[in-house]
Image (tube, rainbow, N blue to C red):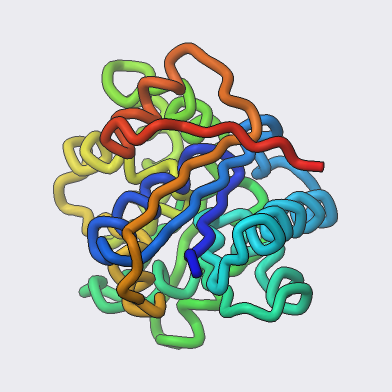
Amino acid sequence: MPVGVFDSGVGGLTVYRELIRALPDTDFIYLGDTARVPYGARSKEIIIQYALELARYLTENYHTDQLVAACNTISSCALEAIEREFNVPTFGVIAPGAESAVELTKNNRIGVIGTLATISSGAYKQAVARLSGATAVFQAACPLLAALVEEGILEGEIPQLAIKMYLEPLIDKGIDTLILGCTHYPLLAPLIREIYPHLSVTDSTKKLIPRIDAKVENGRRIIMVTDAGGGSTESLKTRLVGGIPLKKAALS
């Protein structure tokens, strides 16, 4: 049975891409809720409602036996609700991202950037504290960055200015490691590294992959979005997944 991967939009395709690269024989199905993106400024109750709908669609229609919430907002607000509702192993991206950062930091000063919901939840601070009580965590909500990625604006003056606006206060705190606390942000990682070459920039994928129960299947790939839309996001999706055809899903 396939692994279900879901996100509020196309950002989770960064996680999906690494999963299918690392586990080529395992079946994966991706569902992105592009009709209702972004989730980051919504209430916790709405995020939980939407996340349960996505997980239910995958488990009922595709009989997924593992779920990956490839979204930091969902992972920080709704993971426990998903785990209670569905009797399948469910993996978020917060704990793997925190684990990677704790291993990388040399001065025990970690920065986290994410959506307002992720940052407000304090999930990364809690996850890092469980691993290393001596490590300080400094956070910044970055509402513009996911929108830039959704529009495929990954280079040039506009994303540079946005990155500097959000990260400078963290740099002033002396961080040496930055957690990309939104699955959209790895698309901006090259630009972040160009601006701040001294930073170790990390996300969840390296530590998430070993958590998945890899199976020898058909290597089936299905990608669905709740609203196929058009424009620049279509080319972004194609770059992310190497031209894998998109399919459209309608949530009931």
- Residue 168's quadrant in the figure? top left
- From where the camera sits, is residue 174 visible? no
Q: Indicate whether 214 appears above or below 117.
A: below
What residue occupies the far top of the structure in this picture?
231
Q: Give the image location of residue 89, x and y in percent.
A: 57, 79
* Residue 107 left/right relative to 59: left
User: Residue 171: x and y, percent?
Assistant: 33, 50
**Camera-side residue of 132 and 88:** 88
Regarding residue 149, the answer to whether it shows in the image is: yes
* Nearer-the-camera pick, 216 or 108: 216
Residue 236 relative to residue 206: left or right: right
Which of the 4 quarters of the picture holds residue 228? top right
Q: Give the residue drawn at x 43%, y 86%.
A: 131
Residue at figure coordinates x 50%, y 49% from the top left: 30
Q: Where is residue 215 in the image (x, y as percent from the top left)?
A: 35, 76
The residue shown at (35%, 59%) is 203
Q: In which quarter of the image is residue 217?
A: bottom left
Q: In which quarter of the image is the C terminus?
A: top right
Above or below: residue 165 compared with residue 181: above
Counting from the top left corner in percent of width and height, residue 176 is at 26, 61
Side of 58 relative to 138 (left or right): right
Q: How many labels does the image show?
A: 0
| Residue drawn at the location 47% of the way across and 74% of the way down | 95
Instruction: Name the residue at the front extreme.
Output: 218
